[in-house]
Amino acid sequence: MKLRSTLRTGVLAVASLTMATLAVSPADAADAAPGWQVSYLATPDGYPDAVGVVHGTDSHGGYAGTLKLGDSDQVVTWKDGQPTVHPLPTGWSRPKVGGENWAGTVVGEVTIGKGQQAFMLTEAGFELLPSPAGYPYLGATAINNRGDVVAYGFDTRGTGQSVLWRADDRAHPEVLTSAGIFSGAADIDDDGTVLLNRYPEAMLWKDGVVRKLTSPEPGGLTRGEAIRNGVVVGMHLTYQTSARQGLLWHDTDAPTPLPGAFTANKINRFGLVAGRATSQTGPLGTWLGTHRVGDLPLPEGMTNVGDPGALGDDGTVVGTVGSTRLTLDVGRPVIWRPHL
């Protein structure tokens, strides 16, 4: 019932957003679009001003990230507005959350000794994902809804490579050698398609077959940020002018510019996109297809915002804000909900 209710909420939210943006001219869309309500995510008791990053959502009221609590970073999850701190096992430090799926399974990376390993957090607690032989540095970057996990890391020679753990056989991680070295996994779709970046291009990997994403122009840097239902969002950087353009790919051969998008960072199953508008220091914006829905407001007194941390199928966006410029997106965790 919870899943069905959330999906219905997501469908209604996107339908309303679509009607609001398509019923008016582009010049009036920002004024006519529904607003967004911003609020702070609660912090653990004793840490009212805790800062960190939030990079996961289960799309039905759950979120995951890391907060600096005292002298150490800790993994924190939120459910029904309440935070839960998950103390790290002995010997673990410097956790980073890569993503979260519908089941509430969280993945990321953690430092152990002189290396990094990929971890998974479920209701049963933390567990390490087995690393392929010769890979002492790995960090999980994403998990899809069936439980496939991808990571990026380095072998003992310093060669970068991406790794896949299939949900039905996590004991045998697969190194994505056909994608080439230094191909970093950015995301994984629900059908197992992996989105990767290898300078200066982006590509899709599925069962050993690689397809490159077409750039909007020769040269420059193209980067994919997220994939959902086969649709990719990302950006292109033009070297000569340093201009960036947020992009959407419905097909690998057809990059589509998003109006007013500096970058496009997240996409949900209904096609709602969240990214950075206008410039590196611009506001966060939202789009449906090529139609700009509106910008995400800041809480009173805050002047800076990090990149979108996660975008749920229920239409919620999570991220971080601050009164000064953020470093590595570390700030006060917030949530934006569509106000229809």
Image (tube, grey):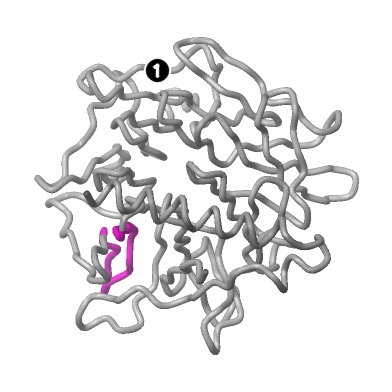
- Residue placed most toward the observer, 38 or 49: 38
Residue 58 spot, x, y in % from top left: 32, 50
Q: Main secondary structure of the magenta part?
A: strand
Q: Is residue 183 left or right of residue 260?
A: left
Q: Which amino acid type corresponds to the residue marked 1 in the rendered image?
A: Val
Residue at the limit of the structure toward the right, as seen here: 240
Q: Judge the density around disc 1: few (<14), some (14-19), many (≥20) Cα neighbours within 10 Å.
A: some
- Residue placed most toward the observer, 74 or 261: 261
Residue 202 spot, x, y in % from top left: 64, 29
Q: How many marks?
A: 1
Q: Residue at x 27, y 71 (%)?
A: 81
Q: Is residue 66 above or below residue 161?
A: below
Residue 299 spot, x, y in % from top left: 52, 82
Residue 16 spot, x, y in % from top left: 56, 59
Q: Is residue 102 left or right of residue 186?
A: left
- Residue placed most toward the observer, 23 or 212: 23
The residue tagged 1 is 175
Q: Is residue 292 above or below residue 155?
A: below
Q: Is residue 17 above or below residue 254?
A: below
- Residue placed most toward the observer, 207 or 7: 7
Q: Secondary structure at mark 1?
A: strand
The boundaries of the magenta stretch are: 61-75
Q: Residue at x 22, y 18 (%)?
A: 169
Q: Residue at x 27, y 66 (%)?
A: 72
Q: Is residue 337 left or right of residue 136?
A: right
Residue at the limit of the structure toward the bottom, as seen here: 301
Task: Verify whether residue 159 appears in magenta.
Answer: no
Residue at the limit of the structure toward the left, as seen here: 124
Question: Residue 29, located in which quarter of the rendered image?
Answer: bottom right
